[in-house]
């Protein structure tokens, strides 16, 4: 079962439509987290730029991408 899940998730990574959705959602979620703090406003495009310079933000986006791929697998089951 574990190998099946890993193979399916690896397959999702080569699917442009799924990855576009997952990446967009990840950027939106990180932007929402940043904007939730008082006095801060952030857009997904800003997160994309911030992730290039800040490893913490880049890792947070990557976390959401991994979770999104797991969610896609779970939805397919």
Image: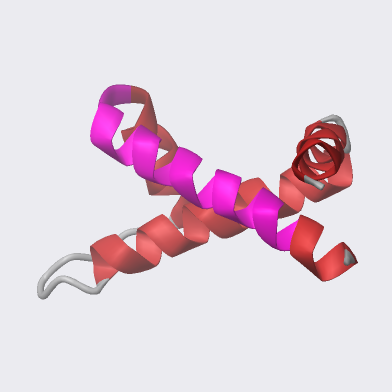
Left or right relative to 26: residue 39: left
Q: Quadrant of residue 67?
A: bottom right
Q: Residue at x 38, y 59 (%)?
A: 31
Q: Residue at x 38, y 34 (%)?
A: 58
Q: Nearer the viewer, residue 3 or 52?
A: 3
* Span colored in magenta: 53-72
The C terminus, quarter of image: bottom right
Q: Residue at x 49, y 61 (%)?
A: 28
Question: In the picture provided, is 8 more to the left or to the right than 74?
Answer: right
Magenta segment includes 1: no
* Residue 13 placement (x, y as % from top left): 78, 34
How does the figure colour the protein chain or chains?
secondary structure
Q: Main secondary structure of the magenta part?
A: helix
Q: Residue furthest left?
A: 39
Query: Where is residue 45 shown, x and y percent of the image?
Result: 47, 47
Q: Position of residue 75 (x, y in %)?
A: 81, 69
């Amino acid at each position: 079962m574990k190998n099946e899940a890993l193979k399916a998730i690896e397959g999702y990574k080569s699917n442009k439509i799924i990855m576009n959705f997952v990446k967009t959602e990840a950027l939106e979620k990180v932007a929402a987290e940043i904007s939730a703090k008082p006095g801060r406003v952030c857009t997904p495009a800003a997160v994309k730029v911030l992730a290039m310079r800040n490893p913490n933000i880049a890792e947070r986006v990557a976390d959401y991408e991994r979770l999104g791929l797991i969610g896609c697998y779970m939805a397919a089951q």
